[in-house]
Amino acid sequence: MANGRTLFPAPRLVLAALVAGALAGAVAVYVRESGSGNTPADTVAAASGADDTACAAKAGKAKTVAASATGEVAALMPADPPMSLKAFSFNGPDGKPMTLADHKGKTVLLNLWATWCAPCRAEMPALDALQKEMGGDRFEVVAVNVDTGDDAKPKKFLADIGVHTLGYYRDATMGLFNDAKQRGLALGLPVTMLVDGEGCLIGHMNGPAEWASPDARKLIDAALAS
């Protein structure tokens, strides 16, 4: 243990993490065929100006929150520097386009997942449990499915494993993953980003975690208190 952090994930997730690494190459090939992202260039440019400047000033906050990421969620790293993710776009539960800015005022745990990603499948029930326990006016788990094609397969998967609390967020273009990859946040799937109420990235993690754990709850409490 170093600085209060557990150096190894729970045994149940070791195999999942290995699978994530094996899938990373396939994901990279898939992304190269899917375009560069889903956010218009002028929107990205605007977000990289004043919003990024304001977010960069939160480096201390990012380090403080990340210091609470121990045990099951020790893989979460502080944003360096914090950046604005307000322009990240995807479809909401109503099927209509939205951006992360629509969650203004709410801390968000943004998770990108796919049905063909074994570690993603393994952690979905835990994300659902975290949303059920802590979701509300101040916090939400926003799990965005990035399968291509229609909604049938991801919706069936969620129903089959009993995930009912998470909102159904979707990006069938793989553009959201591309945006995260271009910013150096995504190596493969799953990828998880902790974002504050002003749309600033505070911390990020590649690979799965046990989100239905006291360690995860402590992390979210720290984010809400900061």
Image: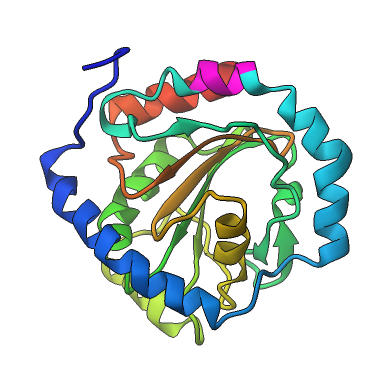
Percent x, y of residue 62 = 58, 24
Range drawn in magenta: 60-65
Q: Main secondary structure of the magenta part?
A: helix
Residue sitting nearer the eye, 212 or 173: 173
Say which residue appears at 69% left-offset and 33% top-offset: 197
Tell which residue pokes out farthest to the top in this image.
3
Q: Is-magenta flag for residue 159?
A: no
Q: Position of residue 138 (x, y in %)?
A: 62, 32
Q: In the depicted view, which residue is nearer to us: 29 or 91?
A: 29
Q: Residue at x 74, y 31 (%)?
A: 55
Q: Is residue 97 left or right of residue 29?
A: right
Instruction: Indicate left or right for 123 with 133 as reference.
Output: left
Q: How is the image coloured?
A: rainbow
- How many marks on residues? 0
Which quarter of the figure has residue 116?
bottom left
Q: Quadrant of residue 218?
A: top left
Q: Looking at the image, is 146 positioned above or below residue 216?
A: below
* Most distant residue in the left direction: 11
Pinpoint residue 144: horizontal percent, then vertical percent: 52, 61
Residue farthest toward the bottom in the current orientation of the protein: 149
Q: Is residue 35 visible?
A: yes
210 with respect to 46 (left or right): left
Query: Vertical placement of 218 versus 37: above or below?
Result: above
User: Can I make out residue 155 in this image?
Assistant: no
The quarter of the picture where the C terminus appears is top right
Q: Is residue 176 above or below residue 200?
A: below
| Residue beneath the point at 35% across and 59% down | 163
What residue appears at the point 74 percent right and 48 percent down from the top-left corner? 86
Q: Quadrant of the N terminus?
A: top left
The answer to which image quadrant residue 45 occupies is bottom right
The x, y position of residue 107, in whole percent, is 61, 35
